[in-house]
Image: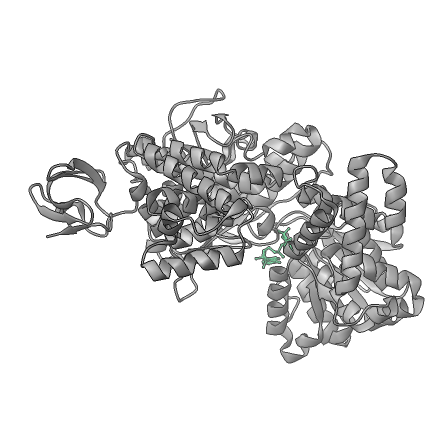
């Protein structure tokens, strides 16, 4: 089959063009990435360009791998020589070869954010600076900005003048730079900055690298920043061919320095430049595309595009309002289960959200339906560090097990070292009891250490005493406040972790409201089931990710959840005014245009713990023209005037889904009068089964208890 067979005339023109500079500006799903891939294959097959002379820069590693795979399918083995990578990986390759010209060894270390924080910790300690005075986040911004603006340490001191806060920052900056030199380490910003600087200082090195390539391609060019652009220009020189593709409507990284003017002005920097516009969208059905277009059209600061599709169908975008986030999640899970039954693969489905914390409810909904999922580019909610920490604090109140103790005793830092912990551990082995029992019952240490431990024990004992009088969520709030854990995250300005923590409180709160008589132990049991890693072998998973991570990807069916004002658009962006909202709208456009055949937009009504107010429907839903969207779910209107049509298939016509994991045993198996045995309360008799819960009569002093039927502590006799 001919390479060009599956291209429309405009795409073909871009693929075979001999122009030195080509710019493709086109909307989502119009085949920009496909054109890049085909062009690379065409250059090799038809124009006899050496594969090793071709460079393609992608935005993410996943995109790079997909591109490699697709080019390999066309070209076979020779494709291995094509340079396909992210711009950071490209810099690493360049620097591994030539960095010695800058006085650094080739085996330099690439630092990630954790490594950066380790150096900051050392610097703060050295200079007696408290994290509450300068957060790590703002310090890293300061370092990045200084480096980007080529502000040396000496200059930073001059700029700081006599302001003590600024002087402290300059000191940390000095420490950081010196430490990097000692360690021969580069952070992510450095990779680009050092390469650009090296090329400027040593024109012969730049010329060597520019000669390596004859054809340079850049995907997602709308999100390029100034330094990246400079590097690309250095590699392009005056001889090389440059082909850039992008969609200004999908610029979603301006908060990280992306500048859409770069793609807009490309034709002025690279003359003469051929601009190709692609107008046909091949990805999405008409309703999805028109719906997304009607939203992005609201942006004032944009260039009008005329994107159409020939993929018409009757299926509209479905907008669903649920009674609460658990219902939203189980509705999504049910839709996926239905689709799977009808023969779709799990990986045909993607669930996109604006912020990571939103995955919590969704994950729960999927687990309840036993649907396998992966979180692309992130960590599952109950595996996130702050969630484990908070749950371990709760475990201190409940069983005080060793693992929980070890996890939380030094969070926040209480100055208890490894030696102290080893001593406690050995003593617990000797006595055959738990580590907590050791510190509760004995005074093994003296001075400050003992004082700290005693204080910790007193705190835990107090929690234990009040535990039975408090609802689980009140207990959780108390524990994270009194332990200083929440304060620690606030001091470190860990906004995302704080959001996750709030979401956990929200989770416990709805659990308490739904099951008022349930105990802390029951909650912990329940979430321990959610924390289980349940990876299926065939690699068929529903994919969960943030909208940012979904850039450039496509899926048969896409759910975009949590569509409330303040969540998506995000509150912080809304506070920035029009600029912020327009970036969020571009993000919504990216999200909606990931769908090939079906797009679901979901939201919940009711009170939001994160927003501390009642939710109001996202403006992006209202902005979709009515012809392209159907409204399902709640028949009431809670925020904005709008009539809702209840579809005959609306889940409101079905019983509400269960909010707890479905029992593996059908309800019918729990009969009234049946004898059971409970791990703690002993023998009992079932009085009632209702909504996944059993009412069981236990002997004095326990009495009648309401317990989840799935609870592992209950067995039939
Ligand atoms: P995005 O802006 O989201 O990155 P894009 O413009 O890069 O999108 P592609 O991912 O290249 O778009 O293409 C979208 C879908 O349309 C892909 O499945 C691709 O294979 C298909 N496609 C592109 N061009 C054609 C064509 N001429 N005929 C049939 N299918 C096509
Ligand atoms: Mg693309």
How far across and how far down the image is residue 96, in percent? 77, 71
- Which residue is painted at 67% across and 45% down in the image? 136
Tell which residue pokes out farthest to the front in this image: 446
- Which residue is painted at 30% across and 46% down in the image? 661
How far across and how far down the image is residue 213, in percent? 81, 70
Is 29 above or below relative to 657?
A: below
The answer to whether residue 314 is left or right of residue 194 is left
Answer whether residue 581 is visible to the viewer in this image: yes
How far across and how far down the image is residue 673, in percent? 6, 42
Is 17 above or below relative to 359?
A: below
Quadrant housing the N terminus: bottom right
Residue nearest the viewer, comparing 192 with 106: 106
The answer to whether residue 493 is left or right of residue 187 is left
Tell how many labels.
0
The answer to whether residue 230 is left or right of residue 595 is right
Is 372 above or below relative to 622?
A: below
Image color mode: one colour
Residue 637 lies in quadrant: top left
Residue nearest the viewer, comparing 357 with 362: 357
Residue nearest the viewer, comparing 386 with 206: 386
- Which residue is painted at 34% across and 51% down in the image? 529
Ligand 2 visible in quadrant: bottom right
How far across and how far down the image is residue 597, in percent? 48, 49
Residue nearest the viewer, comparing 187 with 222: 187
Tell which residue pokes out farthest to the bottom in this image: 77
Answer whether residue 263 is visible to the viewer in this image: no
Tell which residue pokes out farthest to the top in this image: 641
- Which residue is painted at 36% across and 42% down in the image? 397
């Amino acid at each position: 089959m001919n390479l060009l067979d599956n291209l429309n005339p405009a795409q073909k023109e871009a693929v075979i063009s001999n122009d030195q500079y080509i710019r493709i500006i086109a909307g989502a799903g119009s085949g920009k990435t496909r054109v890049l891939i085909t062009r690379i294959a065409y250059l090799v097959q038809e124009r006899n360009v050496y594969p090793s002379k071709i460079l393609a820069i992608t935005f993410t590693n996943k995109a790079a791998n997909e591109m490699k795979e697709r080019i390999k399918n066309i070209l076979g083995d020779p494709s291995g020589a094509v340079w396909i990578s992210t711009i950071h990986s490209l810099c690493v390759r360049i620097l591994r070869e030539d960095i010695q010209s800058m006085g650094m060894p080739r085996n330099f270390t690439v630092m990630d954010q954790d490594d950066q924080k380790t150096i900051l910790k050392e610097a703060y300690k050295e200079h007696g600076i408290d994290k509450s005075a300068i957060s790590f986040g703002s310090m890293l911004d300061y370092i990045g900005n200084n480096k980007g603006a080529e502000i040396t340490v000496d200059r930073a001191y001059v700029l700081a003048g006599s302001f003590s806060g600024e002087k402290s920052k300059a000191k940390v900056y000095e420490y950081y730079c010196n430490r990097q030199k000692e360690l021969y380490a580069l952070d992510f910003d450095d990779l680009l900055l050092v390469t650009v600087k090296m090329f400027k200082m040593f024109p012969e090195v730049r010329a060597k690298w520019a000669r390596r390539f004859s054809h340079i391609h850049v995907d997602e060019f709308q999100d390029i920043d100034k330094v990246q652009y400079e590097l690309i220009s250095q590699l392009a020189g005056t001889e090389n061919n440059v082909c850039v593709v992008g969609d200004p409507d999908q610029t979603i990284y301006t908060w990280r320095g992306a500048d859409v003017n770069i793609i807009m002005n490309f034709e002025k920097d690279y003359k003469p430049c051929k601009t190709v516009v692609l107008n046909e969208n091949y990805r999405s059905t008409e309703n999805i595309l028109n719906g997304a277009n009607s939203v992005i059209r609201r942006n004032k600061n944009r260039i009008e595009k005329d994107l159409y599709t020939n993929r018409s169908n009757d299926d509209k975008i479905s907008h669903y309002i649920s009674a609460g986030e658990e219902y939203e999640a189980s509705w999504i899970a049910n839709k996926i289960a239905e689709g799977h039954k009808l023969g779709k693969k799990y990986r045909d489905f993607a669930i996109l959200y604006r912020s990571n914390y939103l995955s919590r409810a969704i994950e729960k909904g999927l687990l309840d339906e036993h649907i396998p999922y992966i979180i692309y580019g992130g960590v599952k909610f109950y595996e996130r560090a702050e969630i484990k920490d908070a749950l371990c604090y709760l475990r201190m109140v409940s069983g005080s097990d060793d693992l929980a103790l070890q996890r939380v005793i030094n969070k926040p830092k209480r100055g208890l070292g490894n030696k102290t912990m080893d001593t406690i551990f050995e003593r617990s082995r000797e006595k055959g009891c738990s580590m907590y029992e050791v510190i509760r019952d004995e005074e093994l240490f003296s001075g400050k250490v003992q004082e700290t431990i005693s204080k910790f024990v007193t705190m835990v004992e107090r929690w234990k005493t009040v535990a039975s009088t408090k609802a689980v969520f009140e207990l959780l709030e108390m524990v994270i406040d009194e332990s200083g854990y929440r304060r620690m995250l606030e001091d470190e300005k860990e906004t995302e972790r704080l959001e996750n923590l709030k979401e956990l409180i929200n989770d416990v709160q709805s659990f308490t409201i739904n099951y008022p008589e349930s105990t802390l132990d029951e909650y912990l049991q329940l979430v321990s089931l959610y924390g289980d890693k349940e990876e299926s072998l065939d690699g068929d998973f529903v994919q969960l990710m943030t909208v940012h991570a979904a850039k450039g990807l496509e899926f048969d069916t896409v759910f975009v959840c949590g569509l409330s004002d303040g969540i998506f658009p995000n509150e912080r962006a809304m506070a920035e005014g029009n600029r912020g909202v327009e970036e969020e709208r571009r993000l919504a456009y990216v999200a909606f245009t990931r769908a090939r055949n079906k797009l679901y937009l979901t939201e919940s009504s009711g009170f939001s713990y994160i927003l501390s107010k009642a939710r109001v429907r996202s403006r992006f839903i209202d902005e979709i023209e009515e012809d392209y969207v159907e409204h399902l779910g709640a028949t009431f209107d809670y925020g904005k005037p709008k009539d809702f049509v209840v579809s005959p298939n609306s889940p409101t016509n079905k019983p509400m889904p269960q909010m707890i994991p479905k029992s593996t045993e059908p309800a019918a198996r729990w009969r009234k009068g049946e004898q059971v045995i409970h791990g703690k309360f002993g023998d009992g008799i079932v009085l009632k089964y209702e909504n996944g819960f059993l009412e069981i009569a236990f002997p004095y002093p326990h009495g009648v208890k309401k317990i989840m039927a799935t609870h592992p502590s209950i067995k039939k006799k």
